[in-house]
Image (cartoon, grey):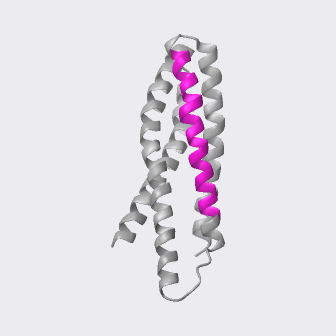
Amino acid sequence: MIYATLKTLHVLAVVVWIGGMVFSHFFLRPALAQLEPPVRLRLMHEVLGRFFRVVLVASLLTLASGIWMLGRVAKQVVQSGGRFEMPLAWTIMAVLGVAMVAIFMHIRFALYRRLDRAVSASDWPAGGAALAQIRTWVSVNLGLGILVLVVTLMRA
């Protein structure tokens, strides 16, 4: 029961994270391109601030639940007298998941702070540069997230 609950939370956190990246990258950002830089940057600053608070929880929940599930399976195998060998798909998922969390932390605690400072100072060129860097790294994370999903779903 605990495993099923954690797996459900794990998947829901991934859905929120990846779904949010898809929404902001492919729908919100292009729609806002018509707005003047001050309006666009203020709006993106507010939206990303809210989204990043949720992703911080989702990414840490994904990481913690993934580690717990791996540990639980390994413990069960060892307790039954077997030798745990992590499947390649799980290894890829774990490595890319850790990389995604690290990239998100860079986005949230370095790049978003630059955007925050620029918006606070009404420095629209600096804000645009920060937002472009955020977009680049979100694209990388989105690509990694999709790769994790493909690896996970193709192993079945």
| Residue farthest along the left direction in this orientation | 1
Q: Quadrant of the C terminus?
A: bottom right
The quadrant holding residue 34 is top right
Residue 39 visible: yes
Q: Is residue 27 above or below residue 19?
A: above
Q: Quadrant of residue 128?
A: top right
Q: Position of residue 20 (x, y in %)?
A: 49, 43
- The residue shown at (56%, 87%) is 82
Q: Nearer the viewer, residue 26 or 67?
A: 67
The quarter in which the N terminus is drawn is bottom left
Q: Residue at x 38, y 70 (%)?
A: 4
Residue 148 lies within the magenta run: no
Frontmost residue, 73 versus 75: 75
Q: Which residue lies most toward the top here?
A: 122
The percent position of residue 59, horizontal first and vertical second, equals 49, 49
Residue 58 located left or right of residue 25: left
Q: Residue at x 61, y 46 (%)?
A: 141
Image coordinates of residue 23 in percent, x first then y, are 51, 41
Q: Is residue 68 left or right of residue 103?
A: left
**Most common secondary structure along the magenta stretch:** helix
**Span of residues in magenta:** 92-119
Front in this rendered view, residue 58 or 27:
58
| Left or right, residue 140 beside residue 71 | right
Q: What's the residue at 66%, 36% (across, down)? A: 136
Where is residue 153 shown, x and y percent of the image?
A: 57, 68
